[in-house]
């Protein structure tokens, strides 16, 4: 079958404020058309695909989104597609739909992070509720990603010395102790600390500590002072 795509299958600037989009992958054209009509009526943009490969060839969604995915597909199964995109698209929650299902299949899908596993036929509102929950999860993930990216950009603007001062300050050292570690005056430490607070947009020391923790979780290297 020829996959159907809507105009949204075009890259667009990523933004949590962009209208959400629901992606549907099902090889049954009647199911695709029915789901598309229902989801559009609920106020969402929709993209539909007849196969996993058609979905993978389309540019990834940059707006809050979710994937309504059939388990049985002609090329790659829905469960295999889930495994393939799990690490690459954490902002895309998956809702499985299937004409048949068993406990092991459901458990596998849910353990891998699926939002819902629905067996056809299902009530329209059940699917729409799952879509709304998935969209909110996607929006939260995109917001977190955008916030972290902004923090990383601010951290990148720090000088080498400012990074050293920040590392010692958030570890709990006083300005005088930081100066002793780095071999600089307390006045100089205060100046660097002020710059760090301004550049990192930290309102307090507690705020700066929280920011530093988020940077470490993201794998962003924190410059430690050289051993003396």
Image: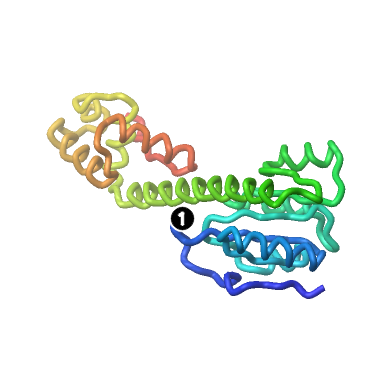
Instruction: Please give left or right for residue 112 compared with residue 74 in the image.
Output: left
What residue is at 68 percent from the left and 46 percent from the top?
Answer: 126
Residue 12 horizontal/vertical position (percent): 50, 68
Is 123 positioned to the left or the right of 45 in the image?
right
Q: Is residue 37 left or right of residue 137?
A: right
Q: Would you place residue 40 above or below residue 194 in this image?
A: below
Instruction: Pick the residue in front: 59 or 214.
Output: 59
Q: Residue at x 22, y 32 (%)?
A: 183
Which of the 4 image quarters holds residue 182? top left
Extreme-left residue of the structure = 187
**What residue is drawn where x is 27% and y is 36%?**
165
Question: Toward the viewer: 161 or 16?
Answer: 16
Residue 42 to residue 200: above or below: below
User: On the rendered image, what quadrant is the N terminus found in?
Assistant: bottom right
Measuring from the top left, give residue 111's x and y in whole percent.
72, 37
Residue indicated by mark 1: 16
Tell me the quarter of the image containing the C terminus.
top left
Along the line of sight, the residue nearer the viewer: 37 or 97: 37
């Amino acid at each position: 079958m020829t996959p159907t795509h809507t105009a949204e299958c075009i890259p667009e600037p990523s933004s949590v404020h962009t209208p959400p989009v629901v992606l549907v992958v099902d090889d049954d054209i009647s199911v695709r058309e029915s789901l598309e009509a229902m989801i559009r009526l609920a106020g969402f943009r929709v993209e539909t695909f007849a196969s996993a490969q058609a979905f993978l060839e389309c540019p990834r969604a940059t707006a809050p989104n979710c994937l309504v995915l059939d388990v049985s597909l002609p090329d790659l199964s829905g469960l295999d597609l889930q495994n393939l995109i799990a690490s690459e698209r954490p902002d895309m929650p998956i809702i499985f739909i299937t004409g048949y299902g068993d406990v092991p299949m459901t458990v596998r899908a849910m353990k891998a992070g699926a939002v819902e596993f629905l067996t056809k036929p299902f009530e329209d509102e059940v699917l729409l509720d799952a879509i709304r929950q998935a969209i909110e999860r996607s929006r939260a993930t995109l917001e977190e990603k955008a916030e972290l990216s902004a923090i990383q950009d601010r951290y990148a603007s720090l000088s080498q010395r400012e990074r050293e001062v920040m590392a010692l300050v958030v570890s709990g050292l006083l300005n005088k102790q930081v100066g002793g570690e780095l071999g600089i005056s307390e006045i100089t430490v205060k100046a660097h600390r002020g710059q760090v607070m301004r550049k990192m947009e930290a309102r307090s020391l507690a705020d700066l500590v929280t920011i530093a923790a988020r940077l470490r979780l993201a794998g962003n290297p924190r410059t430690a002072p050289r051993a003396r």
